[in-house]
Image (spheres, helix red, strand yellow):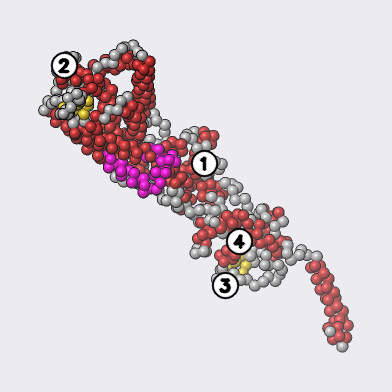
Amino acid sequence: MIINKLRLGLPLWITVALLATGISLAYSSHARAAQPAQETEAFCLSCHSNPELKMTLPSGEELPLYVSPEELKLSIHSPLGIECQACHTEIKAYPHPENTYSSRRDLSRAYYLSCKKCHSAIYEKAQDSMHAQVAADNPAAPVCTDCHGSHYVHKPDEPRALISSTCATCHGKVYEQYKNSIHGSALIDEDNPDVPVCTDCHGVHNIHDPRTEQFRIETPELCANCHADAELMSKYGLPANVYDLYKLSWHGVDVSVYKSRWPTIWHDSAVCTDCHGVHDIRRTDDPQSHVNASNLQGTCQQCHPGTDPNWTDAWTGHHEISLERTPWLFYVDAFYSSFTPFVLWVAGIYVILQILRATIDRARRSAR
Amino acid sequence: MSEPTKNTTNSIPAVKIERSFVRFTLSQRWEHWVLLLAFVVLLLTGLPQKYRATSWSQQILATPDQVAWIQTIHHIAAVVLILEVLYHLGKAIYLMARRSLPDHMFVTLKDFRDAGQMVAYLLFLRKEKPVSGKYNFEEKVTYWFIFFGVGIMLVSGLILWFPEIITRVLPGGVIPAAKLAHSTEAVVAAIFVVIWHFYHVHLQRSNLSIFTGKISEEDMQTYHTLEYERLTGDDPGESEGGSS
């Protein structure tokens, strides 16, 4: 139609100029067809690599839309060919469909469902967690991306201390305690491969409420996972029989009965963490340790109020019977380890001799 | 205690006259009943607590409430036993103060000699058993074993019952020691009673004097010869028989 108009009396030079423009336009659109397809990362990055790119959400929050191509390359997914579309399933082309998220949190809580596509087993596990339970009422409850990141997903445990610092994002107070504990300081200062990070005790994706009867009753075994491992403990010069000795103690027997019979009933018998602390466990010779001699009375008094300083010696600890440490117990043990067999052997032999003599006498008498 | 009781039948002249002696007073027989029942209840309620980690014990201590119940029963039986011990010791002290405590239960040199002779007899090195007074050495062993056993059980039991109070006075180390003593002594005492005492009063011969209070003249002559002679005035033998 333009051509018709041109024919109707435009000067030739204009016609030529217009034609040239048209050809060059046609050519350039041809050139565009050779560009990456709309679904590819490269295509997305043609816009989203612009650091200035952002939009405003209905909540008034600004949503940055920038994705760093360099960092993306270093992440786990992109080099494996898992590109934008894998997660951003509803955005197939440009222009994008209209935004339906009112806030950034809204967007995170919807987008993490994409993880489920590939990581369904872990997703299901996480649905069983404390975090998923509270998510209904608390929008801040973490979803996959809060811990793992969204675009730049890396191995979560490299270095190992990263795990605990990830938890610290929300659990800052606990992290402060942990950081100074024997476990935390070894992790953070020495990158120790053996000390527990948060997830070793709390679980990874199915993190449960640690305040329940069940968690409490499992606590000694949880600690025993490492502290009853002779090889591991010998590395640090620690005794590996603490758990076995605990099981023989008043507290330990009680706990084992509750564990086998009434795991769902709350019990007040001390488990490891009641005395040693939870996140603030320190070496027993550290003056700040709850079980250091200087603090032990107060620790006992948590459950045994009003007890005398003498009371602390009633706990024979995680030590074998010895003359130096537990003289009373040592002497009683020594007495009974000879008295018991003495009494039973003497009484037994005496009675057997009596039976023999009586039987033989009777046999003789009847034979006569 | 001194005069033999006569059970005579009047009409038939050829009848045998059975005489019996008082062996235990009514209060002694009551003491034995109380001790026996307390012992059994304490053992039955104590053993499941000692062996709490075993499954048979957990059948009995099936709920935390049941554990509390068993402990309450154990404590009640312990109080009964304490009262019995106080009565027994109180009576002994009272009699001692009046210089009328019978001395048949005290251990003498003769008991050691008797024990040696008895072992010799059992090994066919002697023809005759040693003769004894009101209580032979076996009976004395039973009495004193239980006497000290009950002492250990009561002291250690009270330590375990009131550990917070005890540690105001005594070092904390006595508590685990008391637990070990209480737990071990109980089993030693129980096994001892079963093999020693039960054999002597049930298997060797049925000796029910502690329930009837009486002993027949025949048994008295056979098993407590010296006491028989002392009471009847026949042929006074060794002086160990006791003079009250």
Residue at 21 percent across and 29 percent down: it is: B214
SS assignment at label 3:
loop
Q: Quadrant of residue A52?
A: bottom right
Query: Which of the two labelled residues, at mark 1 and mark 3, occupies the earlier sequence position?
Result: 3
| Residue A122 percent coordinates (x, y) | 60, 54
Residue at 28 percent across and 29 percent down: it is: B146
Residue at 29 percent across and 41 percent down: it is: B75
The answer to whether residue A66 of the structure is visible from this angle is yes
SS assignment at label 1:
helix
User: Closer to the camera: disc 1 or disc 3?
Assistant: 1
Query: Which of the two labelled residues, at mark 4 and mark 3, occupies the earlier sequence position?
Result: 3
Q: Are marks 4 and 2 on the same chain?
A: no
Position of residue A346 in the picture relative to residue A237 (left or right): left
Q: Are marks 3 and 2 on the same chain?
A: no
Name above or below for residue A42 compared with residue B216: below
Q: Quadrant of residue A63?
A: bottom right
Q: Which residue is mark 3?
A: A58
Magenta stretch contains residue B69: yes
- Gap between marks 1 and 2, in whole Å? 79 Å
Amino acid type at circle 3 is Pro
- Gap between marks 4 and 3, in whole Å? 20 Å
Q: Which residue is mark 1?
A: A225
Name above or below for residue A86 compared with residue B14: below
What's drawn in magenta, residue-wise?
B49-78
Amino acid type at circle 2 is Asp
SS assignment at label 2:
loop
Q: Quadrant of residue B207?
A: top left
